[in-house]
Amino acid sequence: MQASGPQLDREVSELSVPVPWGEIRGKVWGPDQGRPVLCLHGWADNCGSFSTLIPLLPKECRYLAVDLAGHGRSSHRPPGVFYSVLEYVADVLRVAGSLKLRTFSIIGHSMGADIAGMFAALYPEMVDALVFLDSYGFLPTDPKEMYKVLRQGTDEMIQFEKKTEVKKRDYTYEEAVKRLMDANPTLSEQSAHILLERGLLQVEGAGFVFSRDLRVNFKNIHRFSLEQSLEMQSRSQASVLVLLAQGGVERRFSEPAQEKFTPALLQNFRDRNHKVVTVPGDHHVHLNNPEVIAPFVTNMLQTKVLSLSTGPEHKL
């Protein structure tokens, strides 16, 4: 695939950041002194989610794409620990501290955008630009339904812990590709192969297991109302670009009431002069057809980040 404009060199290095329970792994593109851009993937994906997009973005940036805890090649959380947005926010802070990042931009897809939105609300001085890929950055829960969600997530964890042995199913590589594509109909076959580079572990014999922690499937127990989400949204000081896919997130709401909250979230972005764009494609458009969104992301980075940069002040 070819794209016009400056392209990033394709040389990639592996990233490893120590955390109390192991390590956060990932991939790095770009020059050592490039403006840092943290890339956060969606639920059940891994940092390979950005492998086709990043080469089309400005070469002056340094792209740090991480495997979120419990995904890809990163360590699983300790027993008894939940996976939720707030835990991931703490992980972003750990990564930023280890890499000595003072200010940086974040590109987040789906769940990764929810993490980015919350991080920018809690640490607004650290984030200069946000790109939400097929996500609103926050996804409120109806307060009348919140107890059901919280109970479900808690019950799932406790039931999981009661099992004396949890064995992951073995697949052949071809079976794993089919399993991933069946679970994610928006993935092209090429995209499935890209995600499985970090999403599979070979086991004894010829089989494979998915590398992600089974606990990432449980309901996120940290939830926020629309009022709380709008307040958090207003705390961020970053420039924001929201890129929504026509066949994307609005067709994937896990709770029926969520759709009624999105107009308020989008209007709040527009009221604060942020950009909201709808593009053709599906939930994984950034991976399947990165050329569709690369111009928008490139313009955002060039006008809101690179044009304002006066030097490597992003380092501590």
Image (tube, grey):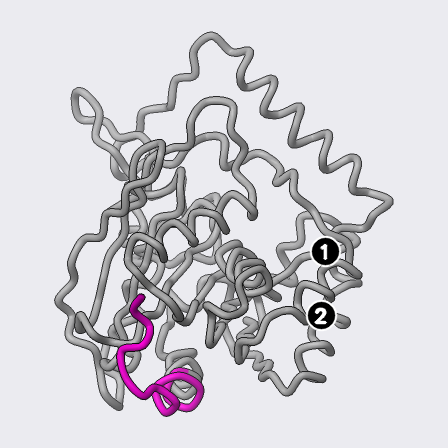
Quick one: 155 or 202, which is closer to the camera? 155
Q: Is residue 122 left or right of residue 165?
A: right
SS at mark 1 in the image: loop
Label 1 sits on residue: 140
Residue 120 in the image: state x and y as whole percent. Answer: 54, 65
Q: Is residue 284 left or right of residue 38?
A: right
Quick one: 244 or 117, which is closer to the camera? 117
| Residue with the most extreme front position | 316
Amino acid under label 2? Leu
- What range of the chain is rendered magenta? 301-316
**Which of the 4 image quarters holds residue 306?**
bottom left
Label 2 near label 1: C-beta < 8 Å?
A: yes
- Crowding at mark 2 (Cα within 10 Å: few <14, some 14-19, many 20+): many
Residue 289 in the image: state x and y as whole percent. Answer: 38, 72
User: In percent of the image, x 53 and y 16: which residue is there?
Assistant: 161
User: In percent of the image, x 66 and y 78: which residue is there?
Assistant: 269
User: In percent of the image, x 65 and y 43: which residue is there?
Assistant: 222
Residue 108 in the image: state x and y as whole percent. Answer: 46, 63
| Residue with the most extreme left position | 11
Q: Which mark is residue 10?
A: none
Is the residue 216 above or below the residue 311 in the image?
above
Amino acid under label 1? Pro
Q: Is residue 224 left or right of residue 47?
A: right
Quick one: 56 or 28, which is closer to the camera? 28
**Which of the 4 image quarters holds residue 284?**
bottom left
Pick the quarter of the image with the C terminus: bottom left
Q: Which mark is residue 265?
A: 2
Q: Earlier in the sequence, mark 1 or mark 2?
A: 1
Is the residue 307 above or below the residue 105 in the image?
below
Residue 111 in the image: state x and y as whole percent. Answer: 52, 54
Calculate the distance from the C-alpha at mark 1 to the C-alpha at mark 2.
9 Å
